[in-house]
């Protein structure tokens, strides 16, 4: 069995009395890209928000079950530490508007009250921007605001910000849905490189994208994990008729 970075056991999530995840058991394999697909409202985003303890920040939200980060009980860890180890990139690029590109990359350290010496900060910024394939485009503009970048560059800046604190997993919630095809291609190719250093979980509505970039795919429907396996198997020989109907465009 491949090493597992994140694992859920009988994970249930609620908003008030409404149950949005129903006993999800999922093992996310280390240094692979796992796509989570399914129609709108099936619980994809709630699932990844549980994985970095953001779900419980919503008033009235709660969860039951277990989540493991390697061999650690994620639900008993300090949430700030969880969010350092399990980074998140959102649908719309969200660089901090008043901060320079340089300070955006270091924001995770600042938010956690960690001070880096200048040489270490410089190295961290360069390494993170190189990892996000952005260094060559911005190295002469590090002290300009991040918001002056294009949408695709802003999303790569957000990826650099998440990578700077050296997470074990990176959650991406439809990271290309607000981007044009060229920027989307850039991010997809970036993910293929990044999985060597970090485990990636991507929520996507785009079936073709899941087929292109993921090693494993989970299909969710109405809060349940219907099917999970290698992308190749799930796309070519789905076991559940609902998976097949979704993949062939009958619903979603």
Image: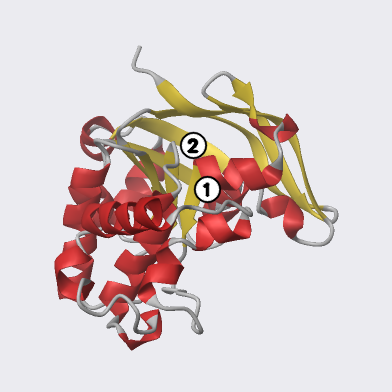
Q: x, y percentage for residue 66?
A: 68, 28
* Residue at 58%, 40% in the rendered image: 224
Q: Which scheme is used to colour this image of the protein?
A: secondary structure
* Visible residue check, residue 141: yes
| Residue at the spot of label 2 | 226
Q: Is residue 193 left or right of residue 143?
A: left
* Visible residue check, residue 248: no
* Residue at 41%, 63% in the rendered image: 105
At label 2, counting other C-alpha atoms closer than 10 Å, the crowd grade (few under 14, some 14-19, many 20 or more) is some
Q: x, y percentage for residue 56?
A: 74, 51
Q: x, y percentage for residue 64?
A: 76, 35
* Residue at 27%, 74% in the rendered image: 152
Dot 1 falls on a residue whose secondary structure is strand
* Camera-nearest residue between 192 and 238: 192
From this viewpoint, which residue is outermost toward the bottom? 148
Q: Is residue 122 left or right of residue 28?
A: left
Q: x, y percentage for residue 218?
A: 41, 39
From this viewpoint, which residue is outermost toward the top? 1
Dot 2 falls on a residue whose secondary structure is strand
Which quarter of the rendered picture does the C terminus lie within? bottom left
* Residue at 27%, 83% in the rendered image: 150
Q: How many marks?
A: 2
Q: Is residue 163 above or below residue 122?
A: above
Q: Give the quadrant of residue 135.
A: bottom left
Q: CA distance from mark 2 to mark 1?
A: 7 Å
| Residue at the spot of label 1 | 221
For marks 2 and 1, the one nearer the N-term is: 1
Labelled pair 2, 1 in contact (Cβ < 8 Å): yes
| Image disc number at residue 84 | none
At label 1, counting other C-alpha atoms closer than 10 Å, the crowd grade (few under 14, some 14-19, many 20 or more) is many
Which quarter of the rendered picture does the N terminus lie within? top left
């Amino acid at each position: 069995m491949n090493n597992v970075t994140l694992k859920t056991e009988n994970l249930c999530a609620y908003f008030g009395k409404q149950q949005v995840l129903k006993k999800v058991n999922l093992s996310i394999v280390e240094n692979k890209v796992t796509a989570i697909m399914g129609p709108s409202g099936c619980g994809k985003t709630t699932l990844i928000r549980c994985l970095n303890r953001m779900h419980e920040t919503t008033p009235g939200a709660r969860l039951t079950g277990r989540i493991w980060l390697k061999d650690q009980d994620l639900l008993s860890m300090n949430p700030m530490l969880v969010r350092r180890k399990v980074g998140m990139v959102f649908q719309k690029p969200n660089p901090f508007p008043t901060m320079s590109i340089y300070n955006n990359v270091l924001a995770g350290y600042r938010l956690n009250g960690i001070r880096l010496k200048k040489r270490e900060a410089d190295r961290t910024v360069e390494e993170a921007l190189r990892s996000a394939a952005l260094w060559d485009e911005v190295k002469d503009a590090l002290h300009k605001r991040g918001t002056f970048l294009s949408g695709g560059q802003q999303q790569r800046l957000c990826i650099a910000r998440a990578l700077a604190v050296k997470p074990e997993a990176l959650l991406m919630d439809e990271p290309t849905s607000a981007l044009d095809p060229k920027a989307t291609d850039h991010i997809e190719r970036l993910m293929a490189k990044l999985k060597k250093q970090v485990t990636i979980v991507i929520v996507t509505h785009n079936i073709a994208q899941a087929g292109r970039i993921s090693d494993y795919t989970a299909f969710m429907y109405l809060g349940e994990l219907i099917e999970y396996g290698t992308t190749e198997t799930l796309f070519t020989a789905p076991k559940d008729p609902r998976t097949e109907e979704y993949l062939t465009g009958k619903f979603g």
